Image: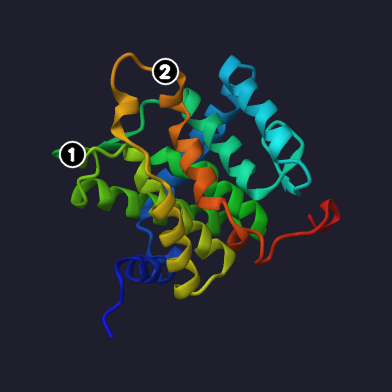
């Protein structure tokens, strides 16, 4: 039986091993991770970020995922918060294709959140970052989202669940279903890149990360039930 596209993406994520990374990747990925963490810290205190912080506190209460800047939230708003922090500062990590562009760092907030939930190692985090970047980059090159009127953040509905599911130890079917649910609900349109620009342009990736984590699938597997579990 021929596998669906989302099953093929899930298989790709599950096949990836740390040993598969090139020497150059093993050197550069930690640099990019530190860059993203630096962006998250630098964004703290900015007015739109303060608004996101209040929203995370109001709607993400009762969770146990530790947050950059302190406190805890549920997985959905932890992913939203961590992604908003990265994108507010980091505007220079573009990848380019003939008709498309995207920001690979948009994956980091969701991947970091899944790594926290799974209590992943540094190597696991590096590999998940590489997986998310690879999937997003292939979609930028091959899928032509923006030429069809979609925003480039729509690709995150594929790359974040695949990398996060790998960290969480899911099988092909579970990752494929997580991707399918995220893709079906994340209709992010390229109009937000048109002038006049609004602050939502910088928060669209955070919304995509929130959508990718939304639902029971991200709270039903290996999710700590109390702060003491960390």
Quarter of the rendering containing residue 18:
bottom left
The residue under label 1 is 147
Q: Which of 161 and 190 is in front in this view?
A: 190
Callout 2 secondary element: loop
- Report whether 146 appears left or right of 164: left
Quadrant of the drawing holding the N terminus: bottom left
Neighbour class for label 1 at 10 Å: few (<14), some, many (≥20)? few
Which residue is farthest bottom? Answer: 1
Res 70 seen here? yes
Question: What number is the disc on residue 77?
Answer: none
- Report whether 125 appears left or right of 20: right
Q: Which of marks 1 and 2 is nearer the N terminus?
A: 1
Q: Nearer the viewer, residue 125 or 209?
A: 209
Callout 1 secondary element: helix
Q: How is the image coloured?
A: rainbow
Q: Which of 205 and 188 is in front in this view?
A: 188
Q: Are marks 1 and 2 in contact (CB under 8 Å)?
A: no
The structure residue drawn at horizontal position 65% and vertical position 52%, both measured from the top left corner, is 116
- Compute the Cα span from label 1 to label 2: 21 Å
Residue 208, image x, y percentages? 46, 42
Residue 61, image x, y percentages? 76, 41
- Report whether 68 appears left or right of 226: left
Which residue is farthest right? Answer: 228
The structure residue drawn at horizontal position 46% and vertical position 52%, both measured from the top left corner, is 160
Q: Nearer the viewer, residue 75 or 189?
A: 189
The residue under label 2 is 198
Quadrant of the drawing holding the C terminus: bottom right
Residue 165, image x, y percentages? 52, 63
- Report whether 179 appears left or right of 165: left
Residue 83, image x, y percentages? 53, 37
Count of all numbered marks drawn on residues in the image: 2
């Amino acid at each position: 039986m021929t596998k669906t596209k989302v099953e093929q993406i899930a298989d790709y994520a599950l096949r990836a091993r740390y040993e598969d990374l090139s020497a150059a990747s093993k050197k550069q990925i930690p640099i990019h991770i530190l860059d993203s963490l630096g962006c998250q810290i630098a964004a703290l205190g900015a007015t739109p970020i303060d608004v996101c912080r209040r929203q995370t506190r109001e709607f993400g209460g009762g969770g146990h995922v530790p947050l950059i800047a302190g406190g805890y939230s549920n997985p959905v708003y932890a992913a939203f918060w961590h992604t908003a922090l990265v994108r507010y500062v980091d505007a220079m990590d573009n990848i380019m294709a003939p008709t498309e562009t995207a920001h690979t760092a948009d994956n980091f907030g969701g991947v970091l959140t899944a790594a926290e939930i799974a209590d992943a190692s540094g190597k696991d985090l590096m590999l998940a970052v590489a997986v998310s970047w690879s999937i997003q980059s292939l979609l930028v090159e091959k899928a032509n989202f923006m030429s069809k009127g979609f925003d480039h953040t729509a690709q995150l509905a594929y790359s974040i669940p695949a990398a996060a599911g790998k960290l969480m130890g899911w099988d092909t079917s579970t990752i494929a279903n997580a991707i399918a649910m995220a893709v079906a609900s994340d209709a992010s349109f390229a109009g937000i890149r048109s002038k006049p620009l609004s602050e939502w342009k910088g928060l669209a990736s955070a919304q995509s990360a929130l959508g990718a984590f939304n639902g029971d699938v991200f709270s039903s597997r290996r999710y700590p039930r109390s702060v003491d579990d960390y």
